[in-house]
Image (tube, coloured by chain):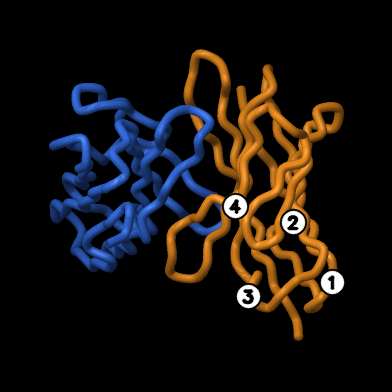
Chain colours: A blue, B orange
């Protein structure tokens, strides 16, 4: 099994729909992150969590929410999807500052 | 505030030639620095990291990077390119100070010609 598993891998949804992207990790790390990747823009941080009770907004959190259900699970929700949220979404985990991230394989989301 | 700039959104080399991918950073204190590789339809994979030990860092797949404080650079190199190196490469910088943020560059796509 992969260290970080994201579901679904691909999703097409309609404008205005609520959608949840799920992430689970087997690394045993406390730190988890959600990033969005757009061509030419690199990765931008949406939300991060340093433990189950610690959730923080990143640089582009508007229109998104998260839930940390357990140390291993961190889900991202789009409450009312819009077309400019079409992107590749990555979940990641890290042991601590300076250790680098382990990424999932990503969820390609298309909002039509 | 931290920032990272990757020079060149696309780099093309011939198989067997030197690979050089450029990364410059801005940070008020010496940061942690990383290079990641992304193959098609996959997530990012850590290639190597600089955390303040040796300034020349060796990573996986024959890649290495040198931290040069005076030039605020962390360029990625590989002596001889393989076809399998074709991918997108991201440089990232992370603060050592009170904040935690990791900032990613826009990425450089490496093409390897036969």
- What residue did someone put label 4 on? B47
Q: Residue at x 36, y 55 (%)?
A: A104
Q: Are marks 4 and 1 in contact (CB under 8 Å)?
A: no
Q: Are marks 4 and 3 in contact (CB under 8 Å)?
A: no
Give the image location of residue A81, x and y in percent.
22, 52
* Chain letter of disc 4 in the image: B
- What residue did someone put label 2 on? B8
Q: Callout 3 environment at 10 Å: few (<14), some (14 to 19), or many (20+)? A: few
Quadrant containing the C terminus of chain A in the rendered view: bottom left
Q: CA distance from mark 4 to mark 1?
A: 19 Å
Mark 1 or 2: in front is: 1
* Chain letter of disc 1 in the image: B
Give the image location of residue B68, x and y in percent.
82, 33
Mark 2 or 4: in front is: 4
Q: CA distance from mark 4 to mark 3?
A: 14 Å
- What residue did someone put label 3 on? B84
Q: State which tag comes first along the sequence, 2 or 4.
A: 2
Q: CA distance from mark 2 to mark 3?
A: 20 Å
Residue placed most toward the observer, B86 or A15: B86
- What residue did someone put label 1 on? B17
Quadrant containing the N terminus of chain A in the rendered view: bottom left
A69 lies left or right of B72? left
Q: CA distance from mark 2 to mark 4?
A: 19 Å
Q: CA distance from mark 1 to mark 3?
A: 13 Å
């Amino acid at each position: 099994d992969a260290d970080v598993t994201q579901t679904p891998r691909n999703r097409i949804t309609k404008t205005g729909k609520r959608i949840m992207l799920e992430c689970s990790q087997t690394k045993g790390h406390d730190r988890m992150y959600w990033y969005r990747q757009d061509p030419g823009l690199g990765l931008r941080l949406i939300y991060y969590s340093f433990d189950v009770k610690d959730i923080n907004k990143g640089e582009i959190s508007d229109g998104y929410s998260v839930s940390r259900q357990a140390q291993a699970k961190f889900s991202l929700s789009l409450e009312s999807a819009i077309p400019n949220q079409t992107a590749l979404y990555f979940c990641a985990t890290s042991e601590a500052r300076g250790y680098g991230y382990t990424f999932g394989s990503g969820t390609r989301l298309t909002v039509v | 505030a931290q920032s990272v700039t990757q020079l060149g959104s696309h780099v093309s080399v011939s198989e067997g030639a030197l690979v050089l991918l450029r990364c410059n950073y801005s940070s008020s204190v010496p940061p942690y620095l990383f290079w990641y590789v992304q193959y098609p339809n996959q997530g990012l994979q850590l290639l190597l990291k600089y955390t303040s030990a040796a300034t020349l860092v060796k990573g996986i797949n024959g890649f290495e990077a040198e931290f040069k404080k005076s030039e605020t650079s962390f360029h990625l190199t590989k002596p001889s390119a393989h076809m399998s190196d074709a991918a997108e490469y991201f440089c990232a910088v992370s603060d050592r100070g009170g904040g935690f943020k990791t900032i990613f560059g826009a990425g450089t796509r490496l093409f390897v010609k036969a």
